[in-house]
Image (cartoon, rainbow, N blue to C red):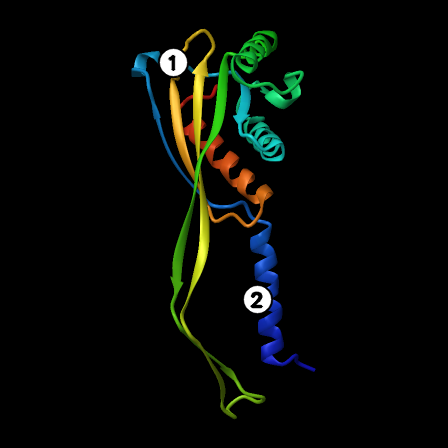
């Protein structure tokens, strides 16, 4: 016995939604070097630190970057695993510098949160038609009016330093587009950022 078309449609929509939920959130990345072409380094090991107040978000971002960079450089060091405790201002900077020295990393990738932006997107009206109970017997027609949905985008800045230099050698701004969850957001952000670092020639592999 064949399932009614409407039931099949509902099941398909549910499966599609679940598939989307497992995907990384789309992001947009704009990047650039701050040094002349002749001085652009290629990094073999990176110390990654997320300068984000919320501990859960900070650890999630660092872990996602560690996973995304793992096969692109020789070694990745994550700040939440290298630092011995939380502190602010100069004390944090001093302990980060010591942790970087201990690790032997040749680069530091610092990620900071810039802003969240809310936008209203219009979804136009839809006219859905499907077959009736039997082929040729008519159509089921459902009209869905247009409406607005509120979406939220997040902007982050990533700054790459070469150990021994105070000024950054590379920077990027990322827009994380309407994430459905923290895990999807950080996975999409980290994957696209790691790819951009490699495409820009900043990584050794």
In the image, is 100 to the left or to the right of 196?
right
Q: Quadrant of residue 48?
A: top right
User: What whole-number distance in Å separates the C-alpha atoms at marks 1 and 2?
Assistant: 50 Å
Asked if residue 101 is positioned above or below residue 112 in the image, the reply reads above
Instruction: Check if mark 1's residue and mark 2's residue have beta carbons within 8 Å.
Output: no
Identify the element where label 1 is drawn.
Answer: loop
Give neighbour class at mark 2: few <14, some 14-19, many 20+ (Cα, 10 Å): few
Which badge, 1 or 2, comes first in the chain's sequence?
2
Can residue 118 be seen? yes
Of circles 1 and 2, the one toward us is 1
Asked if residue 196 is positioned above or below residue 5 in the image, the reply reads above
Tag count in the figure? 2
Q: Position of residue 56 (x, y in %)?
A: 63, 34
Determine which of the numbered discs, if any, sits on residue 177 in the image.
Answer: none
Q: Which residue is mark 1?
A: 167
Residue at the spot 61% in from the left edge and 62% down from the top edge: 15
Q: Position of residue 165 (x, y in %)?
A: 42, 9
Asked if residue 98 is positioned above or below residue 50 in the image, the reply reads above
Residue at the spot 48% in from the left edge and 49% down from the top edge: 178
Residue lying furthest right: 1
Residue at the spot 58% in from the left edge and 33% down from the top edge: 54
Determine which of the numbered discs, if any, sits on residue 13 in the image.
Answer: 2
Q: Position of residue 26 (x, y in %)?
A: 47, 45
Asked if residue 114 is positioned above or below residue 205 in the image, the reply reads below
Q: Quadrant of the N terminus?
A: bottom right
Residue at the spot 49% in from the left edge and 91% down from the top edge: 138
Give neighbour class at mark 1: few <14, some 14-19, many 20+ (Cα, 10 Å): few
Can residue 200 be seen? no
Q: Position of residue 19 (x, y in %)?
A: 59, 55
Identify the element where label 2 is drawn.
Answer: helix
């Amino acid at each position: 016995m064949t399932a009614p078309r409407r039931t099949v449609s509902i099941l398909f929509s549910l499966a599609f939604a679940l598939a989307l939920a497992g995907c990384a959130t789309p992001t947009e990345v704009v990047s650039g070097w701050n040094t002349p072409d002749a001085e652009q380094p290629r990094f073999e090991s990176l110390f990654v630190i997320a300068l984000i107040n919320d501990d859960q978000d900070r650890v999630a971002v660092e872990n996602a970057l560690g996973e995304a960079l793992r096969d692109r450089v020789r070694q990745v060091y994550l700040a939440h695993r290298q630092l011995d405790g939380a502190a602010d201002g100069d004390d944090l900077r001093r302990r980060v510098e010591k942790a970087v020295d201990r690790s032997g990393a040749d680069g530091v990738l610092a990620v900071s949160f810039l802003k969240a932006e809310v936008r209203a997107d219009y979804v136009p009206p839809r006219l859905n038609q499907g077959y009736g109970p039997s082929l040729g017997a008519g159509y089921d027609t459902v009209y869905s009016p247009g409406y607005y949905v509120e979406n939220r985008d997040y902007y982050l800045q990533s700054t790459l330093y070469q150990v021994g230099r105070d000024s950054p050698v590379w920077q990027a701004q990322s827009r994380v587009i309407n994430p459905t969850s923290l895990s999807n957001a950080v996975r999409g952000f980290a994957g696209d950022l790691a790819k951009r670092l490699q495409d820009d020639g900043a990584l050794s592999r």
